[in-house]
């Protein structure tokens, strides 16, 4: 028998199991609360309990002072419930978040296709419809492999089939399995949807989608979603790839660009020989991005008034963030989903606390 | 399994219509503080806030200020009240147990003297500075943040005075820190640093102190004193350190917020902020020469060497910060590479200078013990044995012949940082003193480094007004013409100065703790 936890100011309620922490219950139901250490030490997840009884668990006396306990504060990452409760958390209401509940699904592989020499497309038919916001990801469980792997949905939210793009990671156990052993007809377990990478449509601003490698999946989904509802602002898609063999879905996007005058598709290839007949943009995504938004022949760029959504390898993300910021677009209007392999994660560890989400 | 969740959402949507939504903490705070920022009508805003434009900083929208505090006064008093109760309970216990005798040895107290003479008055100066900056910034979020920090800093100064006053009953050099801070030559280094910031505009002040001092350099300034206290058994100092540190995380956040805010408001702010970062990095780094000497020479039990601290806290952590700032187009501060080159020399040169002039200070110096010299050799394999050990060993031999070396002259001071011209050219010849000069309106001014010369050349009219203690002594403005006249005028008593070996501190310590009972028997 669980309890009901209501999170203000969102006004959303979630079920909390006996012994389950408030933070765990919230995150599993798609309600994001600020948190960091998850062990009751740092105090980042401090919430005010407006109603109900909580058990403080392992909250450190330095992170949660005596008077704060007396006044009904608790650390969500270690506190459990004895009763239905209402908490107030320091969260901004995100008018675009649907707070879709996390659910378990089975999916049957119905199609496999090598999209490029390194990226495989996987199409799955879920046993029940999957609700998600374009840009979100799912966790995929693979037989005999410990822990789930995250992949963004590349299909539009209304499509019947789930579409995933899997780049083969060198020595990667999971991606190696998906590339070599997955067959049409296999059934996979997954939990979905996850993540906060979705278009903030309520801002009503032009959208710049920046994709590199298999990071195309979220932008492709976002684009399908925006075009399906005839989003009335300009939409740019910059797609970076090493060469023509790694550029995929190009004709699909070119067709969309012809049908929808507000959509601009810009493929950028980085690894071409000088005599290559390619007539499109050359170099890196951030370079072409700067050129396209420059009023002074590429010396400076101006991105003010836009929103940018970035998905791709960390060096591309980093270069694009710097280009956007030097063109006057800041953290508030830049969104990323970081996809980290084990190697990327250690490289990305060197960060200062200057930025909250980037 | 999933059914209840949909039900919950449905009932939730229904109940949302009925009851008005509660405000978030952020919204509530914004509403509460927002009214503090009204447009004046009796006088134009530019007259009410006359100092927030001459620096060239352009602010288009003060709403873009992300207030990192979000603390109401009511909550603030409660937090600080609990911190004070905890601190004073520990100070009481410390005093009742005569815990001042638990420190490693009486030499450690000199680190405390340096802190109390040179750093505690900065806490008070910071309180004044933030009150002033808060008054002069027209954005309400920034104003409230500065006001709270002004109160924090006053609390720090007060708790430090209360804590250290107990040591004043037993040791020299702790009796009149406000006079000493205003008059003693080496304390003009921290004093002029802060007054430089306070006499700048409000944006430069917050960039200099909140960002440069509190964020970039705090782990090299405040923290070494506190970890030094912890290693050397000074629990009272450790406790006020913890108490202050719980505010410090807020101040550091403010420092980051300010720089982000300025850089995001207008592209024209970038070169101004970069100049301030360059200037205040170098000013702060020069001030840290005092901390470097404390870490390597004044702690009987050492935490880490200055060189190691610089590598961890500036080269590594600071490097990560500047990589992030590079997204805005900010680069590493000018002359950061000079600071890194000097890390093997800084503490030795500074301590040697204090050893020379210790008869004109309110603390004691000494030649490191043999095992301490070995520690220095190990930590500074490229520099200590080659350049500094021979000098200390020579001075030690003089002292053993009752000819302890005191420098009878007065040193030339750098016009900008006010440190004696003691730093050498570590790049080409570490035995040659660096000397730079600029001529301004027919007068020649001297500098210890290119960094200090740059600061002067950018605003000469400001720095020609610097109050340089040595120059003032020669002009007869400091109590008289003899050393004892000047020292008296600084409120330094005879017991405060000189070599530790001959000090009252040492004799008392031995008497009270029976430290040399064995050798006397």
Image (cartoon, rainbow, N blue to C red):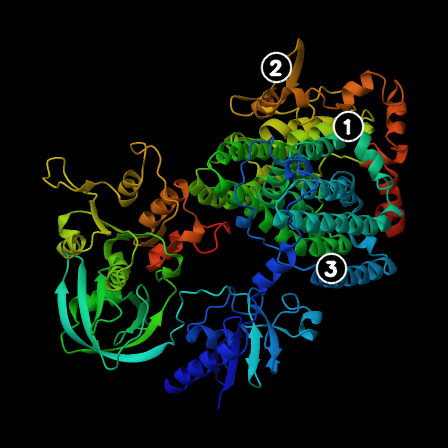
Is disc 3 in the same subunit as disc 2?
A: yes
- Residue at 55% x, 80% y: name it: A80
Q: What residue is shown with label 3?
A: B80
> Secondary structure under badge 1?
helix
Query: B273 or A75, which lies in front?
Result: B273
The part of the image, by quadrant, that contains residue A278 is top left
Residue positioned most to the front: B42
Q: For this view, does B395 lie left or right of residue A268?
A: right
Chain to which the residue tagged by mark 2 belongs: B
Q: What residue is shown with label 2?
A: B438
Task: Work out how far the residue at label 3 is from the one at label 2, CA to CA, in angstroms.
Answer: 48 Å
- Residue at 89% x, 50% y: name it: B512
Is disc 2 in the same subunit as disc 1?
A: yes
Is B309 drawn above or below residue A67 in the view shown?
above
Assess whether mark 3 and mark 1 are in contact (beta carbons under 8 angstroms). no
Q: What residue is shown with label 1?
A: B185
> Secondary structure under badge 3?
helix
Is B135 drawn above or below residue A165 in the view shown?
above
Task: Work out how far the residue at label 1 is from the one at label 3, CA to CA, in angstroms.
Answer: 35 Å
Which sits earlier in the primary sequence, circle 2 or circle 1?
Answer: 1
Task: Work out how far the residue at label 2 is from the one at label 1, CA to CA, in angstroms.
Answer: 23 Å
Chain to which the residue tagged by mark 1 belongs: B
Query: B92 or A352, which lies in front?
Result: A352
Chain to which the residue tagged by mark 3 belongs: B
Quarter the N terminus of chain B occupies = bottom left
- Residue at 65% x, 43% y: name it: B221
């Amino acid at each position: 028998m669980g309890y009901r936890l209501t999170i203000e100011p969102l006004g959303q309620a979630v079920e909390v199991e006996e012994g389950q922490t408030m933070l765990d219950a919230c995150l599993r139901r798609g309600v994001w609360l600020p948190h960091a250490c998850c062990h009751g030490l740092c105090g980042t997840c401090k919430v005010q309990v407006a109603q109900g009884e909580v058990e403080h668990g392992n909250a450190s006396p330095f992170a949660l002072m005596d008077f704060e306990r007396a006044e009904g504060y608790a650390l969500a990452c270690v506190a459990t419930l004895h009763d239905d409760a209402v908490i107030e958390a320091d969260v901004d209401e995100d008018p675009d978040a649907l707070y879709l509940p996390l659910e378990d699904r089975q999916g049957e592989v119905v199609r496999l296709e090598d999209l490029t020499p390194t990226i495989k497309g996987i199409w799955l038919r879920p046993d029940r419809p999957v609700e998600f916001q374009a840009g979100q990801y799912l966790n995929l469980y693979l037989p005999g492999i410990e822990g789930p792997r995250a992949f963004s949905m590349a299909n539009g939210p209304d499509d019947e089939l789930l579409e995933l793009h899997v780049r083969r990671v060198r020595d990667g156990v999971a991606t190696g399995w998906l590339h070599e052993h997955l067959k049409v007809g296999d059934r996979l377990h997954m939990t979905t949807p996850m993540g906060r990478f979705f278009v903030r449509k309520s801002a009503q601003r032009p959208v710049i989608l920046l994709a590199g490698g298999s990071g195309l999946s979220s932008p492709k989904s976002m684009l399908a979603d925006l075009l399906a509802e005839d989003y009335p602002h300009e939409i740019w898609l910059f797609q970076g790839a090493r060469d023509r063999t790694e550029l995929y879905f190009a004709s699909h996007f070119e067709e969309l660009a012809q049908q929808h005058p507000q959509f601009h598709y810009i493929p950028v290839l980085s690894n071409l020989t000088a005599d290559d007949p390619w007539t499109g943009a050359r170099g890196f995504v951030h370079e072409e991005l700067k050129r396209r938004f420059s009023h002074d022949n590429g010396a400076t760029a101006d991105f003010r008034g836009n929103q940018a959504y970035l998905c791709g390898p960390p060096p591309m993300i980093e270069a694009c963030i710097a280009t956007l910021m030097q063109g006057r677009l800041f953290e508030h209007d830049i969104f990323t989903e970081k996809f980290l392999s084990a190697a990327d994660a250690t490289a990305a560890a060197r960060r200062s606390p200057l930025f909250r989400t980037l | 399994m999933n059914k209840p969740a949909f039900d919950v959402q449905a009932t939730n949507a229904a109940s949302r219509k009925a009851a008005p939504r509660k405000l978030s903490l952020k919204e509530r705070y914004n509403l509460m503080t927002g009214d503090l920022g009204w447009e004046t009508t009796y006088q134009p805003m530019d007259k009410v806030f006359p100092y927030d434009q001459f620096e060239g900083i352009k602010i288009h929208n003060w709403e873009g200020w992300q207030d990192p505090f979000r603390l109401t006064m009511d909550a603030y008093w409660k937090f600080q009240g609990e911190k004070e109760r905890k601190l004073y309970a520990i100070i009481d216990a410390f005093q009742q147990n005569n815990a001042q005798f638990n420190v490693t040895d009486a030499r450690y107290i000199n680190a405390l003297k340096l802190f109390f003479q040179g750093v505690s008055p900065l806490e008070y100066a910071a309180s004044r500075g933030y009150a002033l900056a808060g008054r002069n910034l027209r954005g309400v979020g920034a104003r409230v943040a500065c006001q709270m920090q002004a109160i924090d800093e006053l609390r720090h100064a007060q708790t430090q005075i209360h804590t250290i006053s107990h040591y004043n009953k037993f040791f020299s050099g702790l009796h009149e820190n406000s006079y000493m801070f205003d008059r003693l030559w080496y304390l003009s280094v921290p004093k002029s640093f802060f007054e430089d910031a306070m006499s700048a505009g409000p944006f430069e002040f917050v960039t200099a102190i909140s960002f440069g001092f509190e964020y970039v350099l705090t782990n090299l300034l405040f923290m070494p004193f506190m970890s030094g206290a912890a290693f050397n058994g000074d629990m009272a100092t450790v406790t006020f350190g913890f108490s202050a540190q719980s505010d410090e995380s807020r101040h550091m956040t403010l420092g980051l917020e300010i720089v982000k805010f300025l850089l995001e408001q207008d592209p024209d702010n970038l070169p101004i902020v970069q100049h301030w970062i360059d200037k205040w990095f170098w000013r702060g780094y020069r001030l840290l020469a005092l901390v470097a000497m404390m870490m390597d020479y004044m702690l009987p039990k050492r935490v880490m060497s200055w060189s190691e601290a610089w590598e961890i806290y500036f080269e590594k952590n600071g490097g990560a910060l500047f990589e992030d700032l590079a997204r805005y187009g900010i680069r590493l501060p000018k002359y950061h590479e000079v600071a890194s080159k000097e890390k093997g020399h800084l503490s030795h040169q500074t301590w040697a200078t204090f050893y020379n002039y210790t008869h004109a200070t309110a603390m004691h110096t000494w030649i490191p013990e043999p095992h301490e010299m070995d520690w220095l050799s190990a930590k500074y394999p490229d520099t200590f044995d080659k350049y500094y050990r021979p000098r200390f060993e020579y001075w030690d031999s003089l002292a053993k012949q009752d000819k302890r070396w005191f420098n009878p002259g007065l040193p030339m001071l750098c016009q900008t940082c006010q440190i004696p011209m003691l730093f050498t050219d570590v790049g080409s010849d570490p035995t040659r003193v660096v000397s730079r000069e600029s001529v301004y309106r027919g007068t020649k001014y001297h500098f210890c480094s290119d960094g200090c010369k740059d600061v002067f050349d950018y605003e000469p009219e400001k720095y020609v007004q610097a109050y340089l203690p040595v120059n003032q002594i020669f002009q007869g403005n400091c109590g008289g013409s003899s050393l004892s006249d000047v020292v008296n005028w600084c409120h330094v008593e005879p017991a405060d100065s000189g070599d530790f070996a001959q000090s009252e501190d040492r004799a008392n310590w031995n008497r009270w703790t029976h430290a040399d009972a064995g050798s006397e028997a």
